[in-house]
Amino acid sequence: MTPNLHLWLIPLLPLVGAAINGIFGKKFSRQTVAGVALSFSGAAFLKVLAVAFSFSSLAIPHTETLATWIRAGSFQADFAFYLDQLSLVMLLVVTGVGLLIHVYSVGYMWEEGGFYRFFAYLNLFMFFMLTLVLASNYLLMFIGWEGVGLASYLLIGFWFTKDSAAAAGKKAFIVNRIGDFGFLIALFLLIKHFGSLNFEVVARSVSPLSPETGGAGLLTAIGLLLMVGAAGKSAQIPLYVWLPDAMEGPTPVSALIHAATMVTAGVYMVSRSHVIFERAPTALMVVAIVGTLTALFAATIGVTQTDIKKVLAYSTVSQLGYMFIACGVGAFSAAIFHLMTHAFFKGLLFLAAGSVIHAVGGEQDMRQMGGLRTKIPWTFWTMTVGTFAIAGIPPLAGFFSKDEILWRAYQASRVYWATGLFTALLTSFYMFRLWFLTFFAEYRGTAEAADGHSPPHGHADGHRGIHESPMVMVIPLVVLAVLSFTGGWIGVPGSLGGSNRFDKFLGAVFRSTTPALDPQQQAAGEVTSAEKETEAPEPQSGHATELVFSGISVLAALIGFGLAWLLYWRNPLWPQQIASSLGGLYQAVVHKYYIDELYATLLVKPLIAGSALILWHGIDRDVIDATLDNSAHGANEVSDAVRHMQSGNLRSYAGWVAAGAALVIAYMVWMGTR
Amino acid sequence: MVPISYYLILSGILFACGVTGFLIKRNIISIFMSIELMLNGVNLSFVAFAAQWHALSGQVFVFFVMVVAAAEAAVGLAIIISVYRTRETLNVDQVDLLKL
Amino acid sequence: MNMDRWSPVILSLVTFIPLAGALLLTLLPRRDRDIRVFALVVSLLTFVLSLHLPVHFHRAQAGFQYQIDTPWIPTPDIHYHLGVDGISMWLVVLTTFLTPLCVLISWKSIQQRVKEFFILLLVLETAMMGVFVTLDLFLFYFFWEATLIPMALLIGMYGHGRKVYAAVKFFMYTMIASVFMLAAILWLYAKIGTFDFVTIQNAIRAGQVANFAGAAQWLFLGFFIAFAVKVPLFPFHTWLPDAHVEAPTAGSVLLAGILLKMGTYGMLRFNLGLFPEQARANAWWVMILALIGIIYGALVALVQPNMKKLIAYSSVSHLGFVILGVFSFTPAGLDGATLVMLAHGISTGALFMLAGILYERRHSYEISEFGGLASSMPVYAAFFLFMVLASVGLPLLNGFVGEFLVLSGAFQARAVYGVLGATGVIWSAAYLLWLYQRVFFGKIMHPVNQTLSDLDVRERVALLPAAAAALVMGVAPLLWLNAIDPAVHTALAPFEQLASKVAGQ
């Protein structure tokens, strides 16, 4: 007897909160608004905990159908929810980190206008994200998918009087839509060939197919198209361009949506579709390659950025790349592991960055910071934990998850591993660069900023000088710091003496339908195909090698730390000299390789110009309408010519009558003589 | 017996005179007289044929034509008087606006 | 009270009560306020009566319901034959739903010749509904042409700018195209001896029509050209932007909301219903034109400086989706096409109402005149955003379900159709969000926009039903699909037979 857990409550509670705050919030006090928002997202979190506690007594996977949504011909899609280990992990991350960020936002946004609007949007986001995670079919997931895009649009453009914020929101939505286009085609393929979008039905239909039996072409196409969608939502090449611009939104938004949850939806979706990907090795390879390239690419840009949020944004893109590398080599549970730890430390880093920005009265340029270590201690220490975690220093969370990815990547291809390792070095470097620039040396900001009067980046503040954030903002930082420290301990691999409980937990999801695998083929130095990996536990003999590789990763992290220490603590004049000596190369990197400009020139401007000149003026006005107007003119001309017959002159009429009569008589005579 | 062709030629000449007058004349009353001339030309040929074929229907038709001609003359002259009153002219070329 | 008693006459009532109201209006004295109230009462009454249709509809039963069939004129044999199936029923309800909203939205903007305006509106309502309920070809043509006159007068008398040019263009273009349909109808009458749709359909299916095979393609084209101009299908669409821009708000709402659907409905009912083989044979170029319409309409909308013209071109794009679905000959495609028809009527109708609200305040539709309006008119901005999202096809709002099904059906017909059509989701987001940003976001550029008044009660009452409908249709489309799906299956039956015939050869 499957118990009814009323899973539908989990997404719907935040929706109710959003509705209440959205419709009535204008009249509420700030306390009431905050209370409503926190209660409903808190209630969702409690519900998830309750489900987690009863998890072991359930038959997994556990589905609950609420109602039928669409039925057209033979196609049907339901409002139905699907609970298994993967969705439980995602639920815990989304509601847990989400609740913490809600609490933080109360403090961060307290002085802002539109307080009720912010929390309505935030709760609305939770509704859509939870729908995405709990959905039992691709169509319901797509509701959540597009819905989080909407919430993102609303929240990036929260300070809508600012043109750059409004433009950034629009850019995010449109670029996401390009990804959604790919996602939709994949869904159509699924409907056409399998008749349903339900995960279980698709998995059942796909299982018997394998690369040898000819299903490869279809599954590869579906996988590649799904990846297009994931690339849009999770900011991978070539659709990552919206994420750095999204930093226009308030910092809690960047933390929640653009670090911890929404951008991970692509990773979740690819993992959910592992049945398809495992049978489409080409698609998997593309996933891995895209992840690798994005990770490296974004990390190089992060090295040069001076805005503290932009560094974190590019870091997010890079870390998401890691998750896709993991997916691409078939290590789906490793990807989810990193997703979870990343939610902790990146969420922490963003929130702490928000705390820093709050402290210096709205300044976001790190060159104007410095020496904050003693002035905002709570922020400093929590951010330190986050920085160490992302750099991959043991025993913090980032080490375990990143290490597992690198190890699995190595087993698939040395190129993936090498690139990932170098990226880890860069990650450590730019994160400690951020750390040193923000907290060490002397404060470089202007006197006004120190008094809290610097021009706000949409962030109004009092006149109190550099000050620590209130407790309501600090407590979530502390909680996230604890999680960043300990979060990796559930995934300690066998080589270090642990039992990797996380991997085992998720293994039930990913192990069930893995087909027999090809042995690896590795051409020298080249990326090859068939990068599938089994989730079977590591043999004892691999442990020593794994330890060596872990050591190499830690070494890379330490080298990064060392370089940052060298350039930003010991010799602070060197970075400028290096930058000038690199000249054009540095300029290209700091301008993000001019990709945005490239897109604008190659795609956006020609599209608009072409539509205006060729389609509108050229075809619509000058061809189609011209034809119509000319034919009307022609009718007018003919009328004008014929008009002269109606002269009003009696004798001309008489003349015509006579002529006509003569013609008729002539005709009759002629007929008569025939 | 006068050959019928004489009557028909005379009828034709009368008709042609009527048509020519109708087309050339500018005075509306002259045009009306031309119309009467045309009608009488036709009457003549009707009578000629009736005499030849010994068919009474031809002469009956002449009566019809004469009655219609009389009615038409009455109405037409009334119109002419109305036009003359407003336009002060009997010159048909100057009444070309189709409105009174 | 057993409401089913009304079923035999409900269609006559619903169709002609507006006309009766219009006739009564001619007798009322010229007190503007009374006239408006009367018009509102009549249109609301019609709406309430029309609700009888979905409530008492027998979902499982295929074929036409609520039929009324009485012989009217003996020679030629014209019957007063009315009836609806799942598809036309919802189009009727859409008509009665939008008309009271139009009355409300025109409350203040029409100040001259108010009586004539509402008479024209009510006569138009009757004519529009007549198109959807009639099953007699003569009556169909009659109602079809009858919609032209009130609409042309509405545009020409109460519009602005080049209103006379727009009205004449609309009238002439549509009427000339309809003449071909008249020719086809007369041919059918000559060969079959009746104007009754069901009889004609059965005769064609049974192969009893002499010379049919040779004439079928021309008959198909005759009907098609009339509907193609109405839809409007590229390249016959250029009357639409002019008509919409210069029309008064209520005219635009009804034009976009209902009149365009008459074209797509006609294609579904007549082109597919009477000439399935020709439909299948001609589908390839129809689909291409539909795809061009989707993409071209969206791209031209992108660069319009006039808000109403932008929405007009977006209609071209959306209706392209409908044609794509109809000519895919799949259940998903036709279900989706019907849903898009209904959804577009509501969301684009609402967008026109919103544009009209702005025009009342600033007497301009030029986008450059605005900017930053979200600061001075937040409630208006919220409604506008809601309808933009519905138009863009956000899931859980009404646009998505239909669009998704249409694209799925088109994809099943031929993959490239689905792929090209799906690019529409990118373009629609582009032009709609860019419009929204230019009008509502950023700082207020023109000081006069700072003091604009937000929506008053009347305007909110006019917009709220549309917004609510958009949400309900998106969340619970089954309420509509329950009736539409069986009708679609009936409509597609000859295509399945065709497919098996082709396969069996």
Image: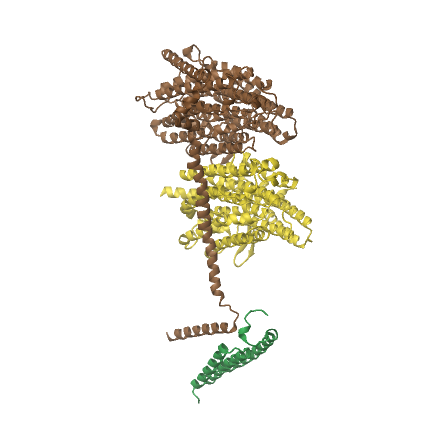
Chain colours: A brown, B green, C yellow
Q: Is residue A460 above or below residue C186?
A: above
Determine whether, in the image, residue B62 is placed left or right of residue A421: right
Residue furthest bottom as drawn: B1
Judging depth in this view, the residue of A352 and A306 nearest the camera is A306
Q: Residue at x 45, y 72 (%)?
A: A660
Image quadrant containing the C terminus of chain B: bottom right
Residue A128 visible here = yes
Whole-percent x, y for residue C152 in the image: 56, 53
Judging depth in this view, the residue of C179 and A574 nearest the camera is A574
Determine whether, in the image, residue C282 is placed left or right of residue C152: left
Residue furthest top as drawn: A497
Q: Tally the numbered discs.
A: 0
Q: Is residue B54 above or below residue A406?
A: below
Determine whether, in the image, residue A431 is placed left or right of residue B84: left
Judging depth in this view, the residue of A26 and A334 nearest the camera is A26
Q: Quadrant of residue A214?
A: top left
Judging depth in this view, the residue of A553 and C189 nearest the camera is A553
